[in-house]
Image (cartoon, rainbow, N blue to C red):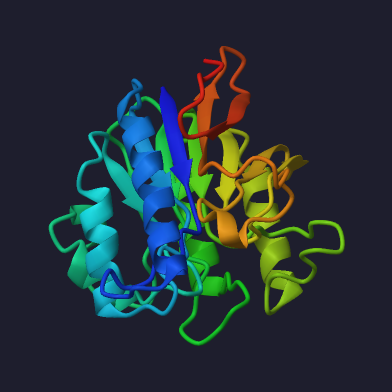
């Protein structure tokens, strides 16, 4: 199974005539076109889809994502508005309904996908309260023999001096790590938020942070590389996650 990941597009309204709005829209447009040229099974979007959480920004997002041929699954980032997301993607069963949390399970593939909501309205830092902890623990206990990939906006670990204390309460990030460590069938965690490309071992599995699609907010990538970037992830025969950061328009390794 081949999964594409996009994150942190920070889109502005399509009605904006600012260079930033046009640049960010073009970055996502080029990634979508590149993803469509490959044999992708699913696309996960790890949040901060828009900049201000406004309906007109989500209209732009919906328009840019419409050409995607593979199924798309989104979790919110701190810049997203969950009600506006639900309104925009109301035709998607996994995003339907109401409630405080926007997380879900996708059982349509050999690899189980679990989207986790780490956001609270008005809060920049991540949250993983007791209700979320109970939900994830129960979900992972349902099918303990099945390889499972998690995706979330906020990484539950520090990244050098660049991203420290990313959760409002450190014990909540520790709880997420503890839950994942107890479930050996979790093969990876995909994150956004940091705008920085990171691969590391975490909680007995592998964690990946992808750089932002929007090149004007990207960190940790050679500035000479100005193309939009997304990631490709494939599960190896040994249940390890093989990942590639892919500039749009380049030839993939897989």
Front one among 229 and 136: 229
Specify whether 246 is left or right of 38: right
Taking the view exactly as shown, the residue that stands out farthest to the right is 161
- Count of picture labels: 0
Q: Measured from the top left, where is residue 137 in percent x and y?
A: 52, 54
Q: Is residue 105 visible in the rendered structure shown here?
A: no
Above or below, 2 relative to 80: above
Specify whether 53 is left or right of 86: right
Q: Measured from the top left, where is residue 50 in percent x and y?
A: 40, 68
Image quadrant occupied by the N terminus: top left
Taking the view exactly as shown, the residue that stands out farthest to the left is 91
Give the residue at x 38% y 41%.
Answer: 30
Taking the view exactly as shown, the residue that stands out farthest to the bottom is 122
Q: Measured from the top left, where is residue 83 in percent x and y?
A: 28, 77
Front one among 93 and 212: 212
Front one among 127 and 12: 12
Give the residue at x 38% y 62%.
Answer: 22
Give the residue at x 74% y 50%.
Answer: 220
Specify whether 200 is left or right of 189: right
Report which quarter residue 81 is drawn in. bottom left
Taking the view exactly as shown, the residue that stands out farthest to the top is 237
Above or below, 28 relative to 36: below
Report which quarter residue 182 is drawn in. top right
Specify whether 202 is left or right of 76: right
Above or below, 89 relative to 66: below
Q: Measured from the top left, where is residue 250 in percent x and y?
A: 51, 25
Give the residue at x 37% y 32%.
Answer: 35
Q: Is residue 229 visible in the rendered structure shown here?
A: yes
């Amino acid at each position: 199974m081949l999964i594409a990941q996009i994150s942190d597009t920070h889109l502005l309204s399509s009605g904006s005539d600012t260079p930033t709005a046009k640049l960010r829209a073009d970055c996502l447009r080029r990634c979508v076109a590149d993803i469509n040229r490959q044999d992708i099974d699913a696309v996960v979007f790890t949040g901060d889809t828009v900049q201000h959480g406004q309906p007109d920004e989500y209209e732009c997002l919906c328009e840019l994502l419409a050409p995607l041929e593979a199924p798309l699954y989104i979790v919110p980032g701190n810049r997203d508005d969950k009600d506006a997301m639900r309104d925009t993607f109301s035709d998607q069963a996994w995003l339907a309904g109401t409630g405080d949390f926007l997380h879900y399970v996708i059982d349509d593939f050999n690899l189980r996908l679990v989207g986790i909501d780490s956001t609270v309205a008005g809060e920049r830092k991540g949250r993983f309260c007791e209700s979320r902890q109970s939900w994830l623990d129960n979900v992972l206990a349902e099918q303990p023999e099945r390889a499972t990939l998690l995706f979330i906006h906020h990484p539950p670990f520090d990244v050098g001096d660049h991203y420290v204390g990313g959760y409002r309460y450190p014990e909540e990030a520790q709880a997420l790590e503890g839950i994942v460590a107890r479930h050996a069938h979790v093969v990876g965690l995909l994150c956004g938020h940091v705008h920085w490309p990171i691969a590391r071992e975490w909680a007995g599995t592998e964690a990946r942070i992808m750089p932002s699609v929007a090149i004007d907010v990207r960190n940790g990538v050679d500035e000479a590389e100005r193309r939009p970037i997304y990631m490709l992830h494939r599960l190896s025969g040994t249940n390890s996650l093989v990942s590639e950061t892919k500039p749009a328009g380049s030839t993939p390794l897989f």
